[in-house]
């Protein structure tokens, strides 16, 4: 498996609280992605990054923000968590734009 | 926007039976990728198809990319219990930048021994 980790792996939080998920890679890949996975919806892209400080929105970006200050770290922030953001979040990396994506182990987030 | 539909959503087979999942895009794709996710795991890349009409094989798995580059299929011959998991197709649009993939909803395969 590619050198990609996510933290925390599990989190339970309350509605209205801020939450930050971290994705860390040791592969020096340029592209990084955040997805959420929900039953019946597959994987949906939230935000992605094509370089340090270069990010763009995916198909379900409302309520989420991201930052990438270093090649190896990509942070996903929920400014004010809602129950609809209960999901499993996967980070992925890729060395070229049309290449294979390698996924992290995932973070299971529950918003009560 | 671009959509990728995948059917069926679930498939239950007896070990030894064949299995096929189908993927259809609303727009022409530059390439399509297939991933497998074991229960409780993360998606793992299987293969990428780029050329119109392309067919690739990996042991008992056969992948096809349609002539119009809008559909694809994955066929497993003589399923085994190790094939259990959810199979996703993921397409990249021809005008895409940044390597964004649109994933299908996935087909969950269960295999009864």
Image (spheres, rainbow, N blue to C red):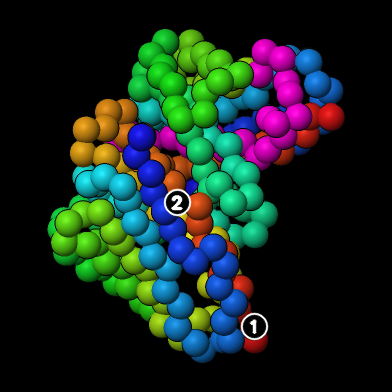
- Marks 2 and 1: in contact by CB < 8 Å? no
Please say whether residue B49 is visible from this viewpoint: yes
Please tell me whether residue B21 is drawn above or below residue A64 in the rendered image. Answer: below
What's the distance in space between the residues labelled 1 and 2, CA to CA? 25 Å
Q: Which residue position holds label 2?
A: B104
Position of residue A96 measured from the top left corner of the image (x, y, whole percent): 29, 34
Q: Quadrant of residue B69?
A: bottom left
Q: How crowded is mark 1: few (under 14 residues within 10 Å), some or many (20 or more)?
A: few
Name the secondary structure under disc 2. loop
Q: Give the range drawn in magenta.
A: A78-99
Q: Does the magenta stretch include residue B18?
A: no
Occupied quadrant, residue A88: top right
Residue occupying image coordinates x 59% and y 42%: A37
In this rendering, is residue A86 above or below B35?
A: above
Of marks 1 and 2, which one's residue comes earlier in the chain?
2
**Left or right: residue A112 compared with residue A102:** right
* Res A15 quadrant in image: top right
**Residue occupying the point 21% across, 39% down:** B94
Image location of residue B70, percent across then percent down: 25, 54
Q: Which residue is drawn at 30% across and 61% down?
A: B72
**Where is residue B99 drawn, in percent x and y?**
32, 34
Q: Which of marks 1 and 2 is in front?
A: 2
Q: Is residue B107 left or right of residue B57?
A: right
- Label 2: chain letter: B
Around disc 2, counting alpha carbons within 10 Å, would you say few (fewer than 14), some (14 to 19), or many (20 or more)?
A: many
Is residue A25 in view? no
Question: In the picture shown, does residue B66 fall above or below B61?
Answer: above
Question: Dot 1 falls on which chain?
Answer: B
Q: Nearer the viewer, residue B16 or B6?
A: B6
Q: Label 1: which residue?
A: B112
């Amino acid at each position: 498996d590619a050198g990609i980790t996510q933290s925390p792996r599990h989190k339970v939080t309350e509605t209205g609280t801020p939450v930050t998920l971290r994705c860390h890679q040791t592969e020096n890949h340029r592209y990084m992605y955040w997805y959420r996975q929900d039953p019946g919806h597959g994987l949906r892209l939230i935000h992605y990054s094509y370089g340090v400080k270069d990010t763009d929105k995916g198909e379900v970006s409302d309520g989420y923000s991201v930052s990438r200050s270093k090649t190896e770290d990509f942070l996903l922030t929920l400014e004010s968590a809602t129950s609809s953001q209960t999901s499993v979040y996967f980070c992925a990396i890729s060395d070229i734009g049309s290449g294979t994506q390698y996924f992290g182990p995932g973070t299971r987030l529950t918003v009560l | 926007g671009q959509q990728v539909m995948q059917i069926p959503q679930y498939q239950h087979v007896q070990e030894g039976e064949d299995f096929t999942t189908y993927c259809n895009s609303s727009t022409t794709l530059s390439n399509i990728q297939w991933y497998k996710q074991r229960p409780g795991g993360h998606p793992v890349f299987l293969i990428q198809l780029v050329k119109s009409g392309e067919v690739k094989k990996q042991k008992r798995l056969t992948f096809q990319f349609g002539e119009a580059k809008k559909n694809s299929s994955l066929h497993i011959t003589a399923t085994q219990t190790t094939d259990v998991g959810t199979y996703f197709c993921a397409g990249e649009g021809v005008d895409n930048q940044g390597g964004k993939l649109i994933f299908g909803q996935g087909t969950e395969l269960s295999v009864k021994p």
